Amino acid sequence: MSLVPKRIFYVKGKGISSDSKLLSFEQALRNAGIEKFNLVRVSSIIPPYCKEVSKNEGLKKLKTGQIVHAVLSRISSNIKNQMICASIGVAKPVDQGVYGYLSEMHAIGEKPEILGKSSENIALEMLATSLGIPFISKSNLDQNKELMRIKGKTVETKNITEMAIVEEEWVTVVAAAIFIL
């Protein structure tokens, strides 16, 4: 049996619990639709020819209790008025035969659009440097994508980001890339 994923999908969720951090995490997994699986955290490579599918299509391929590999970003807080965010950045070449990268980030007090773009840029930097393409860390995402294109590697990037403002209870946000073997 090959352990190279054939499909990938993305989820995000938030959970709240007045009782505990763990219960808020469980609620975030439920909100994301991935609470019924035994999640195993893995690092950040999207294999060549790994097809992106919708969340609904991906969930249909998985069974309750199954061990599922995931790149997971998560953060919890119970500090009133704190903004928390979790993000997965995606950078994959248009050429399906080349692997891509995922990055997971979380932050307190950072706007979700800023964290999302940062997670995309980090995934793009990991991809570029692994392919031997110089990368300018302080450049913006569009400039770096153009640099990749000039070097002959057209890439697509995106992010999956969840945000919440903490009230008086435990709050957890998650973002995840879910692999299907």
Image (cartoon, helix red, strand yellow):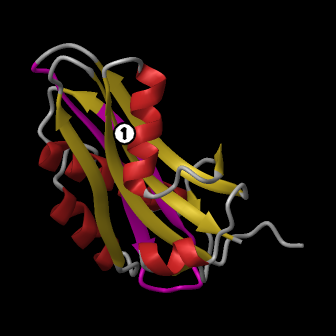
| Along the viewing direction, whichever of 121 and 164 lies nearer the viewer | 164
Q: Say left or right for 88 vs 101.
A: left
Q: Say left or right for 39 vs 59.
A: right
Magenta-colored span: 81-106
Residue 15: name its quadrant: top left
Residue found at the very far front of the displayed protein: 19
Q: Residue at x 26, y 47 (%)?
A: 162
Report the residue marked by disc 1. Answer: 105
| Quarter in which the N terminus is drawn | bottom right
**Residue 134 in view in this figure:** no
Residue 66: name its quadrant: bottom right
Query: Residue 29, how many percent across, how many down?
Result: 45, 46
Q: Identify whether 96 is placed above or below 39.
A: below
Secondary structure under tag 1 reads strand
Q: Amino acid at mark 1?
A: Met
Q: Identify whether 150 is placed above or below 14.
A: below
Query: Residue 2, how many percent across, how many down?
Result: 84, 72
Q: Identify whether 138 is placed above or below 8.
A: above
